[in-house]
Image (cartoon, grey):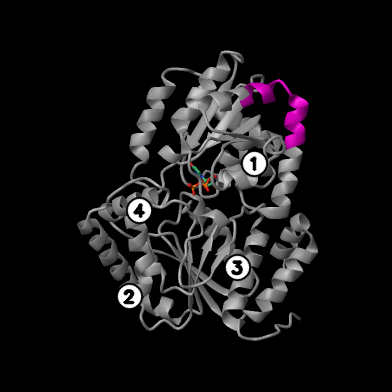
Amino acid sequence: MTTMLESYAAVTGADVIRHLQQLAEILKDKTVVHVNSTRVGGGVAEILDKMVPLSQELGINTRWEVITGDSEFYQCTKSMHNAIQGNRVTIPDSLLNHFQEVNEQNANQLRSILEEADFVFIHDPQPAALLKYCSRRKGKWIWRCHIDASHPHRATWRFIDSFVRDYDASIFSLPQYVQVFPHPSYIIPPSIDPLSDKNIDLTQDELDSVRIRFGINSEAPMIAQISRFDRFKDPVGVIEAYKLAKCYIPTLQLVMAGGRADDDPEGEAVLKEVYLAAGDDPNIKVLLLPPDAHRTINALQRLADIVVQKSTKEGFGLTVTEGLWKGKPVIGGDTGGIRLQVINFHTGFLVNTPEGAALRIRYLMSQKQKMQEMGLKGKEFVRENFLLTRQLREHLTLMVSLQYGGIDRIELS
Ligand code: UDP
């Protein structure tokens, strides 16, 4: 076992790594390409940044390509994202045509890599039309939908379906997101990397330096939401919840940390709404962090007593997994992938309103013992279910089944 694999084994147990090696052995002469639309910002980039090196370490020839587009393209794909999550958005034909043109331009750049690969994982709607322009593809193409697609706006979905139906398989994070395609769909929830800067243990000195840098008072309770400034993450609702809870916990502090994602054009407008709602309250820290501030985010999640993710729609919510892994109870919106992770009264609380969130903040802040118990449960829950090794195992299994599905028996060495 290499040093990297030994480090994972120390967290997950050696049998988990041996299983990955057995699956990788069957795939070792294959090439795998992942394609998405941003190298930094948001959950997909976060996952690929870790999954690609681990796959390579297991001996699978894996690469990660990022498509590029102009602001019109991202305006279109952001509308698609919102429409898949249920907003009634009508996207003009001119933008939909532009979406296809940008996919064609990117296909022209990437064609040989994509057509030659044995497996191509296309993440989310942005690059979904690449397949249309790679007609001589050799391998299996998999569309990976990270979004809550349970109730998509129909016209937009028909447009996306016209590209995705030609894939060999699709992956959704939850069973209720699955849409019918002429190919099989698989359920694979996302994961976090326990060895990344975002999630490794930090020293008390490092925690203290982050606390001092942002003027956080170690004597006062603190809640934190770490998220892109996106309306579905309901940042203004978090501030409302904080204000309600503050009536009972006057020293309460709130950290709202976010950054910019290259493919999210709405962030600036939402950030303005956040500043307006926060007003001049010195106990609300709105932090705009650079894309590589992983250790800072790690520290903020560890400094918080409670991690909040009050989304109204959430495909999965890696920030929830990250909070649980740090032994924190999570107060999360009762939606999508948060429901898979926040087990009410066990790993945290599911809420539907700022009032509900405030009530749970008050309850937990007065029950330190309960907070600790929930934190311990949450961490073990993540170890069992939401670490990178589990997600990679499921990807490898999917590739093996697509490649060798016709064979009755596959021997693992
Ligand atoms: N994140 C980050 N910087 C930020 C905001 C978020 O690094 O300013 C990370 C966060 O820690 C998490 C990911 O981006 O790993 C967000 O994933 P999630 O599934 O929670 O939401 P998404 O942005 O994909 O909707």
Proximity of marks 2 and 3: CB atoms separated by less than 8 Å: no
Q: Which residue is mark 1?
A: 342
- Of the 4 image quadrants, the one containing the N terminus is bottom right
Mark 3 residue's CB less than 8 Å from ligand 1? no
Find the distance from the CA under tag 2 to the CA under tag 1: 41 Å
Q: Earlier in the sequence, mark 4 or mark 1?
A: 4
Three-letter code for the amino acid on which mark 3 is drawn:
His
Q: Which residue is mark 4?
A: 80
- Asked if the residue under mark 1 is in contact with the one under mark 3, i.e. CB atoms within 8 Å, the reply is no
Q: Pointer 2: what residue?
A: 133
The mark closer to the camera, 4 or 3, is 4
Tell me the SS state at disc 4.
Answer: helix
Numbered disc in front, either 2 or 1: 1
The type of residue carrying mark 2 is: Tyr
- Badge 3 is on which residue? 395
Residue 38 visible to an observer of this rendering: yes
Residue drawn at point x = 48 percent, y = 59 percent: 145
How far is mark 4 from mark 1, CA to CA?
27 Å
Q: Which of the marked residues, 4 or 3, is nearer the chain's N terminus?
A: 4
Q: How far is disc 2 from disc 3 in space, using C-alphas?
A: 25 Å
Q: Is residue 373 magenta?
A: yes
Which of the 4 image quarters holds residue 109?
bottom left
At which x and y percent is residue 155?
Answer: 32, 56
Q: Amino acid at mark 4?
A: Met
Region in magenta: 360-374
- The label on residue 318 is none
Q: Within 8 Å of ligand 1, the CB of disc 2?
A: no
